[in-house]
Image (cartoon, grey):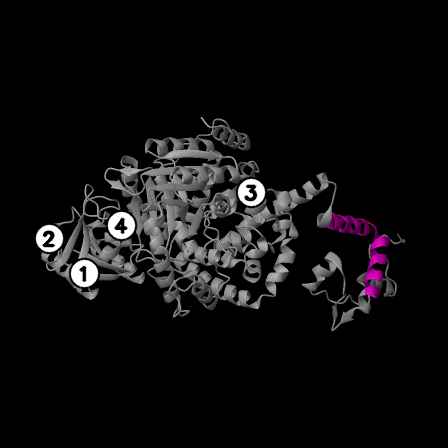
Amino acid sequence: MSGAREVVLARIRAALCDVPADEQAAPPTAFVLGDDGLEEPAFVLRSRFAARVEDYGARVTRVSVAPAAIRAAVAQACVRHGIRRLAVPGDVPVEWLPPGIELLADEPGAPLSRATLDETGAVLTGCAGAIAQTGTIVLDGGPGQGRRALTLLADVHVCVVLVEQIVGDVSEALAAVGAVLGQTRRPVTLVSGPSATSDIELERVEGVHGPRRMEIVLAG
Amino acid sequence: MSGTSSFSEAAHVALSNSQQRRNLRQATTSIRAKRDAAVGEVDQWEALREEGRRIKDRTMRHLDVHLERLEERVTAAGGHVHWARDGDEANAIVTRLVRDAGSDEVIKVKSMTTAEIGLNEALARAGIVAHETDLAELVIQLADDRPSHILVPAIHRNRAEIRTLFRRHLADTEELTDDPAALAEAARRHLRRLFLSVDVGVSGANFAIAQTGTICVVESEGNGRMCTTLPQTLITVMGIEKVLPTVADLDVMLRLLPRSSTGERMNPYTSLWTGVADDPPDGPRAFHLVLLDGGRTETLADEIGRQALHCIRCSACLNICPVYERTGGHAYGSPYPGPIGAILAPQLAGLRDHTSLPWASSLCGACYEVCPVKIDIPQVLVHLRGRVVRQAKQDGWRGRVAGERLAMETMARVFASRRRYEAAQRTARVTARAVTRDGLVRPQLPGPLGAWLSSRDLPAPAAQSFREWWRAQPDQSDPDGHGGAA
């Protein structure tokens, strides 16, 4: 047991001598504000999500849930960016994979090297959820998403979002995130558009270190 | 750096830098408009702010409980928790951890806390190179400059200055233009090599969740993800006030922070990690969390001042502050500039080192209005002014505070007696007339009174006071109604 730990904790307790000894530290129940209890229909959430994610400079392609439609949209995104090699998580649904593209699968037992990820240039993943209000996708390392480095080093991120995965606001998404954080050690990343900076005269530039282009295939 | 060289002296220098003033005015005007639009979209913004305040207030009241819980959860998730009484101790811990990892360089996420404790300088003394990877922090590091804004540390520099800097320091930049996209591309190429090769990452933390042992870093560029994902070892230095009890509390903060900070609905990347992820493996194989006191417990002991610890580093108060917009961040002499810096820096570093900062404000209250967690900055400023004066009394009255006390005591004596008051009026009128031009009193005075008048208009006194006029009226008794003379 370190001395610093005891000293800091003792200092905190001394500083809080005004707090009644019987006051409970227990946090209150989950706070949800702005939720009027009405379920918004899926088509409203889909439109809002698409508009908000486009605001960040991402490109959205709307397709049906048919695997062939998703596959065609992924293929078109590859053509747009001149992608010939695509990194994918090992468990990505095979029916999404376009023909004629070299695929590099990243498996927990056989991970792609950083250099390979850096050179590959594009990645295809699914997601754990999406937030309509903020145009955010949630990656939690679950099925079809892979580890974080996969969606980080590529220059183009193609992400398939199913309409049923879209929730209304941040609170609903964090309820699901809370379950992952509470039960696993899997990291969670909230992604809202491509990487960006406003560090130079507060002028927004899309694409700094993370993917510079984001392609959302919105299915359903 | 000590603030006793005085905010007003430093501000004077900053005010004569017209380039910086132009850069700052343009930047703060644009970010204020973006924030207003983003906040305007939220129906119950005021209720959300109030909830943010309540969460922070309640968390601080039981900080020890939450920190012990955080430690327990981080440890259970395979992380290591270290406690540091002050900046030196934190720096020593990080230095040892980097050495133990067998590295002589680190890649860093932008972090206010590590700037506060001077981690980069401490690592340099130990022969360890710290690479800043945030674009603005890179600019600051290359220019050997100091940050002047919490969110945009190089806000005082324009694109042309940054281009000059990059052309001097980065490879293959002979053709570089001053287009921000081209400058960002140059930084990307320069830093990508470091991201792929350096094996120790150092970050701060925006939030830590006691319930799950999760650390949260909020960012835009992706350098934060790089530094917290790619290295084998990750070291996070966090002030003890950053802990939140639950994920539900994080929810409220994530709805407040981006809109207040960059004026976005959500920032591009929010990273959440819990200890070491091993099933499946994802990211660093070793995680260390350094919990820093560094004056925070002392701040916590002040029942009014402790709300400064609620700050979530959004910088909305800087962007709205009329003083900050004109002086810039350097004048505050602390890594934390602006209104929040004026109440946080003196408390963290000790009031004796920053006696002038509580006066770096016009008390207009705009900072309180925009604060996402409703820190009553004007209230704390006034409270700290009182503490500075009480402390000066204890120390036997020295310096500026002593002069002010003398002036106030003299004024009290003059105001207490009608004879003295009227005599003072007459003296002031005669004196003022000699230095009146265009209806304004413009004396060339040395010292604090001259400084006070140099930025304020004092209209010339009337030729006759009300009392004198009244007495001159036929058949009027004394204006005080007493009849006789004093």
Question: What residue is disc 3 on?
Answer: B348
- Mark 4 vs mark 3, foreground winner is 4
Q: Which of A42 and A173 is in front in this view?
A: A173
Q: Distance between the residues labelled 2 and 3?
A: 57 Å
Q: Mark 3 lies on which chain?
A: B
Q: Specify the amino acid type for callout 2.
A: Glu
| Residue type, label 4 | Arg
Indicate which disc, 2 or 4, sits on the residue closer to the N terminus: 2
Residue B373 is left or right of residue A81, and the answer is right
In the rendered image, residues at marks 1 and 2 fall on the same chain: yes
Instruction: Identify the magenta region.
Output: B402-431
Q: Do the residues labelled 1 and 3 touch (CB within 8 Å)?
A: no
Find residue B344 and report its horizontal and vertical position in percent.
55, 46
Q: Mark 1 — residue?
A: A62
Nearer the observer: mark 1 or 3; the answer is 3
Query: Could you give the CA–CA distance between mark 2 and mark 4, rounded to whole angstroms?
Result: 27 Å
